Image (tube, rainbow, N blue to C red):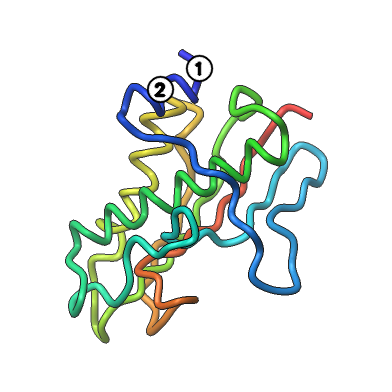
Amino acid sequence: MNPEEKIAELGLELPAPSAVAGNYLPYVLTGNLLHCSGAISMLEGKMTHEGQVGAEQTVESGYESARVCALNTLANIKAAVGSLTKIRRIVFVGGFVNAVSGFADSPAVVNGASDLFISVLGDAGQHARAAVAVAGLPKNSTVEIQVVAEVET
């Protein structure tokens, strides 16, 4: 099944690519590796999840925040290469969770992104990963993810 059809089957919609918020590129393609800049939990110009897991957010709402970040990343991949069918594999996901001091469940939160990539892309969505808690993120986003994807060029 086409990844965009799978996104629709999941009841989701691929958003427009996010605008950059500084002096950087949304992605860099080198060879067949696409390095995607960090994506936060923002849709249509509005934050969907703000604040720290363990304070304003729960592990479950953090998981949903990570799914939004993954959708934004897929939108940027499509903008970079023209179609999600050109994704050969999600190689690496770096997940950052805005969390209270001592928070130890970052992997459970970042699973929101990982699970979405696997649901949409099947085996090509499986990846290596890091999931870390941090004291803050841009715009007070609950989650930010960075992705490296192998794509057809």
| Residue 110: image tag | none
x, y percent for residue 33: 72, 42
Q: How many marks?
A: 2
The one nearer the camera, 35 or 123, is 35
Confirm or deny contact between disc 2 and disc 1 (CB under 8 A): yes
Please state which amino acid type lies under the numbered disc 1: Asn
Residue 119, located in which quarter of the rendered image?
top left
Judging from the image, what secondary structure is the residue with disc 1 in?
Answer: loop
The one nearer the camera, 122 or 9, is 9
| Most distant residue in the top direction | 1
Q: Quadrant of the C terminus?
A: top right
| Alpha carbon separation for disc pair 2 and 1 | 6 Å
Up the image or down, 57 lies above or below 121; here it is: below
Q: Is residue 71 left or right of residue 67?
A: right
x, y percent for residue 135: 38, 84
Which residue corresponds to the image point at 59% horizontal and 28% vertical from the top-left?
84
Residue 66, located in which quarter of the rendered image?
bottom left
Up the image or down, 77 lies above or below 153; here it is: below
Q: Is residue 14 left or right of residue 108?
A: right
Characterize the local packing of mark 1: few (<14), some (14-19) or many (20 or more) Cα atoms within 10 angstroms.
Answer: few
Please state which amino acid type lies under the numbered disc 2: Lys
Characterize the local packing of mark 2: few (<14), some (14-19) or many (20 or more) Cα atoms within 10 angstroms.
Answer: some
The one nearer the camera, 153 or 140, is 140
Q: Which residue is mark 2?
A: 6
Q: Which residue is mark 1?
A: 2
Which residue corresponds to the image point at 61% horizontal and 48% vertical from the top-left?
148
| Most distant residue in the right direction | 31
